[in-house]
Amino acid sequence: MSRSGKVNLAAPVAILAVLAIISFIVFRSPADNAGGEGAGPDNGQQGLAAGMLVDAERDAISRLDVKTPKGESYSLMKHDDNWFALKDGAEYPADEARTASLLDMLPELRSEAMMSDKPEHHPTFELNEDQAYSLAVYAGGSDPKVTLLVGKSTENVKGCFVRLAGEDSVYKASANLRTALGYSFDDYRSKQLWQYDPLLATHVTVTPVLEDGSLTGEPQAFSRDGEFWTIDGAGGNGNQNDLKELVDRFSGLRIQTFIDDPSTLPAEQFNPEATPCLTVEAAGKSYTLTIHGNEEGNIVVSDTDGRVYKTSRSNLGFLLDQDFTLLSFYQEPVPEPSADGDAAGTEADADAEGMEDEGSAAGGE
């Protein structure tokens, strides 16, 4: 109270104003400002903010179920140490690099901030049901460890927005799952037909063949029991170098296009009765190639399971350009370079020359 007897209210009013501002800052919900990428707090602490989104080690992840906004559904599943792409009951080898890239993101995926907890904000982040990708992560068992709905990428494209299935809270994630899930199912299928160790190949059966699938000779069969390829039936050694190259190149054969419905191909490009032209057996499994026909530089082929593809002629050059008459002609294998370079060969030549000199001297005597 002042000396005049009047109450001075300036100080209490100022204190109340400060307290009101502090209360507004402390108790304000981060969802109140949702509606854009920068709207959420920098370090939100509600729910999973600043926490792990996928509670699973990379090696423990056994399956991924993906559903796209367009309704396409497929899975990536691990058998032993190999990944396969599954759709509509059909199973295909998965593209190793693309699958590994997606798997690498998951154990490190973190929530950097909570952006909103209001359903009406989901469309802003492309997280409503008809815009989001769905990703279910399994780590053994029949139930997923977590199912994430994946929305749009962040402005810097280094992250994306996600929410847990059945929950409303939107989080800013540390990695861009949206880009990884934006690939189609065919992108996750391997374009390398098979992967076997050429050193484990034990049998080869090859028939001379042309680009149009015409077989121009009789099948030639070879077996390897140990170091050398031998001719079945006739005995004797085959052409070691050509057979080695045939097996090596066949193990890495790649295709360009998947033909899931070969009935759409003209008859001259696909013959369902065609005979395989090359079969390799390795580690107890058989790998078979059939050539059906060609189309403007692309060749229609099918694999052991009858699946049909198109591949370039250059990918089949090792077979189409092979001189089949030489396969049964024995040729010494090309020696592997020794660690000492040509030292061994030089010494052998020197020894041979020495023997020749000795022989000449003996003849002169």
Image (spheres, helix red, strand yellow):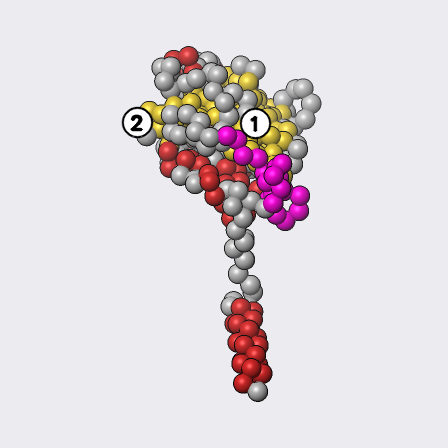
Q: Is residue 166 above or below residue 356?
A: above
- The one nearer the camera, 34 or 126, is 126
Viewer-closest of 303 and 157:
303
Residue 164 seen? no
Mark linked to residue 296: 2
Q: Is residue 145 visible?
A: yes
Q: Give the image location of residue 310, x and y in percent.
A: 40, 26
Residue placed at 54% from the left, 53% from the top?
333
Report which quarter residue 322 is drawn in: top left
Q: Which residue is mark 1?
A: 84
Is the residue marked by circle 2 packed among few (<14), some (14-19), or many (20+) residues within 10 Å? few
**Residue displayed at 61% across by 47% down:** 228
Image mark for residue 61: none
Residue 253: give x, y in percent of width and height: 47, 35
State which quarter of the image contains the C terminus: bottom right
Foreground residue, 170 or 186? 186
Q: Position of residue 86 (x, y in %)?
A: 55, 21
Within-10-Å neighbours for mark 1: few <14, some 14–19, many 20+: many
Decide which of tag 1 and tag 2 comes sooner along the chain: 1
For the record, the magenta segment spans 218-236
Q: Position of residue 50 (x, y in %)?
A: 54, 34
Quarter-wise, where is residue 364 in the image? bottom right
Could you tell whether 102 is left or right of 315 in the image? right
Q: Secondary structure at mark 2?
A: loop
